[in-house]
Image: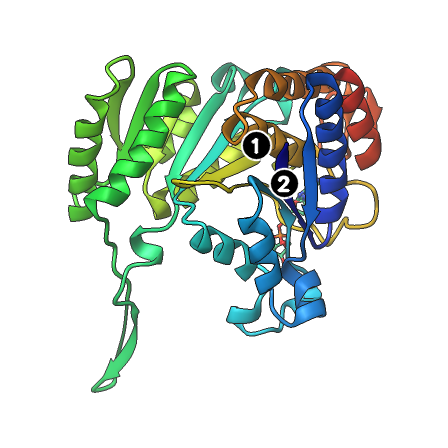
Amino acid sequence: MYKIAFLAGDGIGPEVMAEAKKVLKTVEKKFGFKFDFHEGLVGGAAIDAYGVPLPESTVKLCEDCDAILFGAVGGQKWDALSSQLRPEKAILGLRKHFGLYANLRPAILFPPLVSASPIKQEIIGNLDLLIVRELTGGLYFGTPKGREETGGVVRAFDTMIYTEEEIKRVAHIAFKAAQNRKKRVTSVDKANVLATSRLWREVVERIAKEYPDVELSHMYVDNCSMQLVVNPGQFDVILTENTFGDILSDESAVLTGSIGMLPSASLGDKKPYLYEPTHGSAPDIAGTGRANPIACILSAAMMLEYSFGASEASNAVKQAVTRALDEGYRTSDIKTGAGKVVSTTEMGDVIVNFI
Ligand code: NAD
């Protein structure tokens, strides 16, 4: 039996999570697993109940679970709160508490959605890449950082810092992921300018020797941002540090046509890992039945694969999603090739049916 911390959050979070639960319950029946769902409050819902976005009770609940499935948090109601109390702090708090240092974001363009991509069809081809982003180090966390004023001159500064160990552990995750894919890792850095990037390159090259079946190449981040648009098909796994990964993963997300399709996983050295759709709480469509549940359902599929080693079940979910799209089912965010425009729950039902 696997215990799943089920953190629905705000806005469309609970709506898409309900569909992911339906899918997991189908996987239980079909593949003989037993999942135990433990619901916890996060984000605005937790602020309303406890005054904080990530209550101690939710952290404890997650500690007791094998994996965390997270919906989305945030909304106008809580926008005026100070930065420490904002709903989004829940996700940062969980990443920090559980040492989730590797963020995996696949960008897959499902063939029926090719015309939804902003990139020309002949260039986008069969896009299927995975970005492995270092999540807990680098510029966003390095100290000192701050702002000061001396003699009328205002300065602000951040520090980009990486240890060998931080690079090593995320590199292992990227090489292992590549072994189950097309066996290519592109390590992205700015080694012509940054000392952290030179260390990054050195350590990644050392780790690569442990994976002789995986081909390693290096690319500067400025070139990579260009290559993602002119020749995205060349990539299999992109391994990169925190800030570069933040930017490149959004760029690769938009290549696929809709933010409602993109799952993610955050992994560390020990369970629980965290899985979430990359979109936010979409307050503009919350409660209208228009949310696309696919990103959340594919996040559940990643959970099956990475936390429970259930590749067969995970593939069955992905194939059911592909079939739903192939057969023309679309939520209203997907503007292309709609045979049948369906609601959030109807899309969940179709996918369940195809599993
Ligand atoms: P968003 O991702 O919520 O929405 C951007 C646009 O995409 C909206 O028009 C929305 O309707 C649409 N969209 C998003 N997901 C969709 C889905 N599954 N199906 C159909 N359409 C979808 O980003 P935003 O508007 O910048 O932020 C809204 C709130 O979400 C803010 O409070 C923000 O802080 C929060 N947020 C939370 C997370 C998270 O929980 N991890 C991530 C990003 C933003």
Q: Where is residue 200 in the image (x, y as percent from the top left)?
A: 21, 39
Asked if the residue at tag 1 contacts the one at tag 2, i.e. Cβ–Cβ closer than 8 Å, the answer is: yes
Q: Position of residue 314 (x, y in %)?
A: 60, 21
Based on the displayed image, in which of its 4 quarters is residue 313 positioned?
Answer: top right
Q: Which residue is drawn at 26% across and 82% down?
A: 149
Q: Is residue 308 left or right of residue 170?
A: right
Q: Position of residue 8 (x, y in %)?
A: 69, 49
Near-viewer residue (217 or 171): 171
Based on the displayed image, in which of its 4 quarters is residue 348 positioned?
Answer: top right
Q: From the Cβ of disc 1, is ligand 1 less than 8 Å away?
A: no
Q: Residue at x 69, y 20 (%)?
A: 32
Q: In this view, does 320 lie to the left or right of 92?
A: right
Q: Residue at x 58, y 66 (%)?
A: 86
Name the residue carrying label 1.
303
Estimate how packed mark 1 is, as few (under 14), some (14 to 19) or many (20 or more) residues with alpha carbons within 10 Å.
many
Height in image: 148 above or below 120? below
Identified by mark 1, the residue type is: Met
Q: Which of marks 2 and 1 is nearer the N terminus?
A: 2
> Which SS class for mark 1?
helix
Q: Can residue 343 be seen in this view?
A: no
Near-viewer residue (235 or 268): 268
Q: From the Cβ of disc 2, is ligand 1 less than 8 Å away?
A: no
Q: Can residue 274 be seen in this view?
A: yes
Q: Which quarter of the rendering shows the N terminus? A: top right
Based on the displayed image, in which of its 4 quarters is residue 214 positioned?
Answer: top left
Identified by mark 2, the residue type is: Ile
Name the residue carrying label 2.
4
